[in-house]
Image (cartoon, helix red, strand yellow):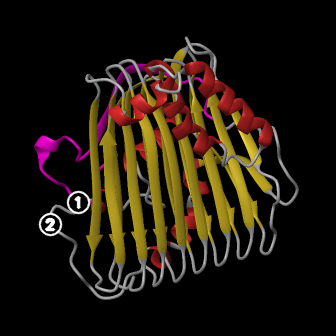
Amino acid sequence: MNKDLNMKVNVLPVLTYGFLKVNDSTVSESDIKIDSFETPGAVKMPKGVDVRRGVDFTEAGEIFIRNKDRIMYTTGDFAGPNADTTGRNEGQAIRTGMGIDVDELMVSAGAKCDVYTVEENVKVSEPVIIEYKMKDGEGCISSQVIHAKKDSEISVILVYESEKEFGGFHGISTRLLAEEGAKINIYKIQMLGDKFIHFDDIGGACFKGGSIGVTTLELGAEKTWTGCLVNLVEKDAELISNMGYLVRYNNFLDVNYIADQRGKNTNSVMHAKGVLMDSATKVFRGTIDFKNGSSGSAGDEQEDTLMLSPDVINRSMPVILCQEEDVDGRHGATIGQLGEDLLFYMQTRGIDEENAKRMMIRARLDSVARTIPDKELEQRVIFYIQNII
């Protein structure tokens, strides 16, 4: 199958000034080859995880549709802010960071979904590991649903990789549901070749006391779009997100992360750290949205970007939206180059500028890689980082 793509993605929940060029992004590609529509079988599948493979994308979303009123519940009838864009994604079974255009692609192309379920009170100690070994010229879109029932726990690692010089197309949709007291931790490591086009869309919901952890490393591909929206539905629900990225050459990375906090005493932490080199472009949107009824909640969104070339383009848009008074929201972006004092310090110890840069890149990316809950894969990713810088 060959398809032309024209998708509006990564739309801010509330639009800002158009000249900033951060309101949304467009995936516009012609004659994209797609020859695979399924998730590869897991290379590691621990006991306690039930899997249904090859499920229709729409059918797999029915678990979210059955709970939609609960997921979208809010107290009061506050009108949305001016330029509110959330209505465009009402047709999704569960809202995602990239938005409804990804769902429509999945349905129109006939992509299949693997559904991973953990029953009540089952705590899976080892991670599920799924690896995409992409060939040159190959195109793949696929989807997963991860459903953790009450007081259960599951970790899932998805790895996308190819040879450095390869190109192709790779698109992923992952939807998450953590019921009362359940924990889902998902890790996504992208090590695709320099000519790949890639997107990775995440949407999720947490019920009372539920937790979703999202850890991502964006290390390859020519063009990458990624988004994550997690709805903290009820009291004490939590989102912990940790991203690392390296964007080089003329490559492009576009990010949209949203914590939608509806329940009381919910907590969100969204941290991103990365490096821009050469003539790379990166857009990062991070939104904490305190809905009416989320009193006692806290949110922290921080980005730290190291720019190692005067030719890079960086756009960062930290956003806090608030319909509640008793909340604690913090956000910020730290953007800069290697300081002269740090370079001088390293040079006095025999470390030249190029090696100093490599050390700083590794420090940022290794700190994320070391959270991968599989030692063999952790070392593989760290070795990959060492070889690309």
Identified at 56% across, 58% down, the residue is 61
344 on left or right of 361: left
In depth, the one of 95 and 292 nearer the eye is 292
Q: Which residue is mark 2?
A: 82
Magenta-drawn stretch contains 37 = yes
Residue furthest out toward the front:
348
Identify the element where label 1 is drawn: loop
Q: Is residue 281 above or below residue 99?
A: above
Q: Is residue 332 above or below residue 150?
A: above
In depth, the one of 178 and 366 nearer the eye is 366
Residue segment shown in magenta: 11-38
Question: Residue 355 location in percent, x, y?
Answer: 51, 21
In depth, the one of 98 and 282 nearer the eye is 282
Magenta-drawn stretch contains 251 = no
Identify the element where label 2 is drawn: loop
Q: Which residue is mark 1?
A: 14
Question: Residue 294 location in percent, x, y?
Answer: 39, 82
Identified at 51% across, 81% down, the residue is 234
